[in-house]
Amino acid sequence: MIESPSSSKKKLILVTAGALFLAALPVAATWSGDVYLISLFTRVIIYALAAVSLDLLIGYGGLISLGHAAFVGIGGYVTGILYVHGFEGEPLLGLFGGTDNALVVWPLAVLVAAGFALVIGSLSLRTSGMHFIMITLAFAQMLYYFAVGLEKYGGDDGLPLYSRNSLPGLDLGDDLQFYYVCLFCLALFLILTSRLVSSRFGLVLRGAAGNMRRILTLGIPGRRYQLVCFMIGGAGAGLAGALLANQTEYVSPTLLHWTVSGELMVMVLLGGLGSLFGPVLGAAVYLLLEEILAMYTEHWMAYLGPILILVVLFAKHGLFGVLTGRED
Amino acid sequence: MILFAEQILNGLQLGITLFLMSAGLTLVFGIMKVINLAHGSFYMIGAYVGATVTAASGSFLAGILAALGAAGISGMVVELIVLRELYQRDHLDQVLATFGLIFFFNELTRIIWGKQPLFMDVPTWLQGNIEIMAGLVYPVYRLFVIGVGCLTALLLWFLFSRTRLGMQIRAGASNRRMVSALGVNIKLLYTLVFGLGTLLAGLAGVMAGPIFAVESGMGESILILTFVVIVIGGIGSVKGAVIGALLVGLVDTLGRAFLPQLFRLFLSSSVADGVGASLASMSIYILMAAVLILRPKGLFPSHD
């Protein structure tokens, strides 16, 4: 993970260009009349948020979680359930009323997702390697079946929201404003995580991923750092879930399905593992590739599959690594 | 009591199917140290080819043979082209490449066989029911599945502990370089082991054909169950696969059959059905979490 000066300069240029592109995109799209691009890129930004949170786990913590969709789903369901209770005026568990105020709902989605991550993480982190992959997968499936069984909240069919959340001073129902809110969330999370990985916390995390025994011998409780990392990752995915529920105005068990976890992992690897900004690029390329292939053939998955295999076999550091000329 | 015995048999039958899946997967995990998400795809290939050949030839046995061949050969081809490159990579690369394989195979079956599920009839000589004990009438076909599974388990045991090939496979699992230095073609051995695993998955698929619908993506739901089996049993252990598969099969089947009734004792029937059903589909994951808390490496950890 050593970065040469030219590589970090390229990285700065690339990140600035990406940020400018995302900031200017809605303006250009409105001007040229391609407004569908705004909702497409809102989707990209939300998935990017989830992918960055997964990169924190895999790329820095060495925690290969194949159940990250669970936290996206939890964020979505917190949003959906609070909305329904607010809409019907029926108190949740007979205690407190629902709400559609984003300032309440989104932090709550983040907290609930982090809480679940605490439980799932502390059980899963008892294992490592192949076991960890399969256990996180199994926990996500467990929550998936739990969501399917939630008859009160739509069960298998999911839960429609009749409008987006309300945010004082803004109208989230407006696609343009919602786009910038999502972009703000992504930027905030990227700043937070990139500060985090270069802090002492991040160093311990990387050390634990490289050699846990050594970290423990130094007297540092490595597992606890990994658990906190798992919770921060879960929290980011929870926020992404809340945003996704708002964008589609719909929550369903498919948010938690294991293929979503797989797709997030693909975005991370496609963009570049352990680079935080790479997964943003990965999410954009993956979703656009899906969109473009689907335009030409309904069997786009038959092409996407082999493309994935080729990327795995030949592009070690993903697209971001290729563009910044990263070396080992 | 009769109902209970019937559900035990159903659980056994699911357990046998899971065993066929997990035996192959645990071998690939244990010997090549590769995590293969696409194992369910070979189950699907077995089911599709089996259903097609059975319908065309009218013979279920021909269908089974074709399914075994198709799953085994496609497995070996995939090993040669993709998996072989992944042995030295980390688990993340393996997960992603095999995830790509799932996309490819699911879409390929949609291209070849269309979106509509295929239905496979139980062959005439296995139709009907048989009275096992007073009052317990059970379909012959499901007994056939249990029988074939037990026979396969015996054959596998014989292969591993009594033949030269089995000895080489076990040796390859513990020290790849040493076996290679002794003049065994380890690459060929790995291809054969992978092919054997996918062949077993194909057998599970074709036998599940008359019970479930044959459709694209059918491999994934069984794949996740197989993972649970392997985690419970311990990665790389065939004995663990047997015990784990039976445990998961029984817990899942009995949970679905009896949990709703159990909850009806103290909840209203509609609430009880909902709670019981969702708890039943979560039961095996709860079982897995419990096993991991007590034994983080599974019930029968392999030595490495």
Image (tube, coloured by chain):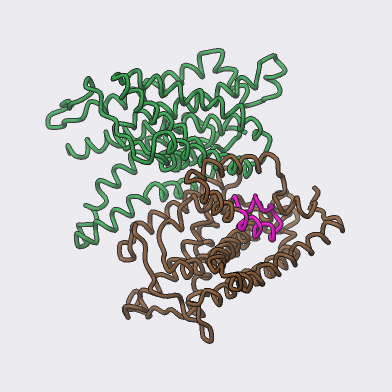
Chain colours: A brown, B green
Q: Is residue A272 magenta?
A: yes
Residue reaching furthest left? B135
* Residue A164 appears in view: yes
Residue B105: x percent and y percent? 49, 36
Relative to A44, is B276 on the left or the right? left
Quadrant of res B131: top left
Number of marks in the rendered image: 0
The residue lying at 61 percent from left, 73 percent from top is: A31
The residue lying at 68 percent from left, 70 percent from top is: A192
* Residue A136 appears in view: no
Relative to A277, is A262 on the left or the right? left
Residue A144: x percent and y percent? 42, 55
Residue reaching furthest right? A5
Q: Nearer the viewer, residue B179 or B45?
A: B45
The residue lying at 66 percent from left, 58 percent from top is: A281
Relative to B58, is B86 on the left or the right? right
Of helix, strand and loop, which mostly describes the magenta segment? Answer: helix
Residue A230, compared with residue A88, is above or below; it is above
Residue B210: x percent and y percent? 29, 31
Residue A77, compared with residue B166, is above or below; it is below
Relative to A111, is B144 on the left or the right? left
Q: Is residue B137 magenta?
A: no
Residue reaching furthest bottom? A169
Residue B171: x percent and y percent? 62, 21
Query: The magenta stretch spans which residues?
Result: A266-285
Q: Nearer the viewer, residue A191 or A114?
A: A191
